[in-house]
Image (cartoon, helix red, strand yellow):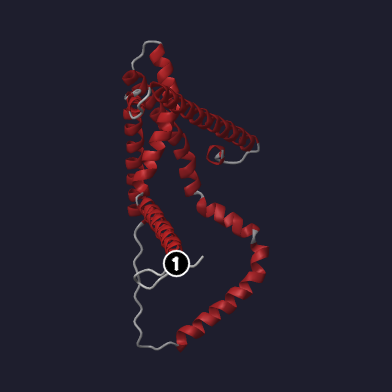
């Protein structure tokens, strides 16, 4: 069967090919747009990690403590009171751990020079073959510097002080911890408000029940996982600290 030419001088059989090519171009453009969007999202999250990381940790802490809040609510304790008590307890645990670790960390920092000297003495035998290589590289650097033009002006970049860097780190850590505990308090005190908002988006009663069951299952699984990981890490750290204390290693809490 012959194909009839159209008014434009083209065959009807060429139209499906053009449609297929247009669909392929559309899929390619959609894939490129999705890739660009994902790249921009990851780029934005990387530079906004100082804000998103505390928010993520706050949600994880709230998911971990939500079953406890729900259990206390069954015993007649309101969410606001139980959430406040749990957040304060978490803050006390964190502050106690920081206080216990502050002394050993300060001692470790103060003894850095002595530890480095001991390591230098023990690694003296390994340094002998490396010293020759260092001397050769130093001579090469001197020859390179002397071969450069004398009119070149060197600009030295001043390093920021240790105290300013430490103050900046402490300030950012304090801000992150404040966001974590305050946001966790609001999430826990809100109770089932977020779950009700999710359920209201479904039309039928069966879909609402299914969505509520899925939300509770996800919450329970995440909470159990985080509690299990926390208990395992705490037990492992305790065992390591006790073993190092038995062996006479200084500051076993830091390494545990």
Taking 44 as reference, is 152 above or below it?
below
Residue 17 position, x and y percent, is: 46, 64
Depth check, front residue: 133 or 15: 15
Dot 1 surroundings within 10 Å: few (below 14), some, or many (20 or more)? Answer: few
Query: Total marks drawn?
Result: 1
**Residue at the front extreme of this rendering:** 1
Q: With 20 as the anchor, is 246 left or right in this view?
A: right
Image-based side of 136 in relation to 102, left or right = right
Image quadrant where residue 234 sits: top right
Residue 19: which quarter of the image?
Answer: bottom left
> Who is closer to the viewer here, 201 or 246?
201
Q: Which residue is mark 1?
A: 14
Q: Position of residue 199 (x, y in %)?
A: 36, 26
The answer to whether 110 is drawn above or below residue 207 in the figure is: below
Expressed as whole percent of the image width and height from the top left, the position of residue 212 reads 42, 24
User: Left of 131 or right of it: where is 157?
Assistant: left
Residue at coordinates 62% horizontally, 72% vertically from top-left? 131
Residue at 41% x, 70% y: name it: 5
- Residue 39 vs 256, above or below: the answer is below
Residue found at the very far top of the displayed protein:
76
Residue at the spot x=40%, y=71% of the render? 10
- Where, quadrant-wise, is the C terminus in this rendering? top right
Residue 120 sits in which quadrant? Answer: bottom right
Where disc 1 sits, the SS reads helix
Q: Residue 145: x, y in percent?
A: 46, 83
């Amino acid at each position: 069967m012959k194909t009839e030419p159209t008014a434009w001088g083209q065959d009807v059989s060429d139209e499906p090919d053009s449609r297929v090519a247009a669909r392929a171009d559309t899929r390619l453009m959609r894939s490129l747009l999705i890739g660009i969007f994902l790249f921009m999202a990851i780029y934005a999250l990387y530079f906004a990690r100082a804000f998103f990381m505390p928010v993520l940790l706050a949600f994880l802490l709230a998911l971990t403590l939500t079953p406890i809040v729900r259990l206390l609510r069954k015993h007649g304790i309101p969410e606001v009171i139980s959430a406040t008590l749990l957040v304060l307890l978490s803050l006390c645990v964190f502050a106690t751990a920081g206080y216990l670790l502050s002394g050993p960390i300060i001692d470790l920092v103060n003894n850095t020079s002595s530890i480095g000297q001991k390591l230098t003495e023990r690694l003296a035998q390994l340094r002998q073959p490396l010293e020759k290589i260092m001397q050769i590289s130093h001579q090469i650097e001197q020859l390179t510097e002397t071969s450069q033009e004398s009119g070149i002006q060197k600009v030295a970049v001043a390093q920021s002080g240790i105290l300013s860097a430490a103050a900046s780190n402490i300030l950012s850590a304090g801000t992150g911890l404040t966001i974590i505990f305050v946001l966790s308090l609001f999430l826990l005190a809100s109770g089932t408000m977020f779950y009700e908002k999710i359920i209201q988006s479904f039309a039928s009663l069966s879909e609402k029940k299914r969505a509520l069951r899925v939300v509770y299952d996800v919450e329970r699984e995440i909470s159990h996982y985080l509690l299990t990981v926390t208990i395992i890490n705490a037990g492992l750290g305790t065992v390591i600290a006790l073993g190092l204390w038995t062996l006479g290693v200084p500051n076993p809490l830091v390494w545990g």
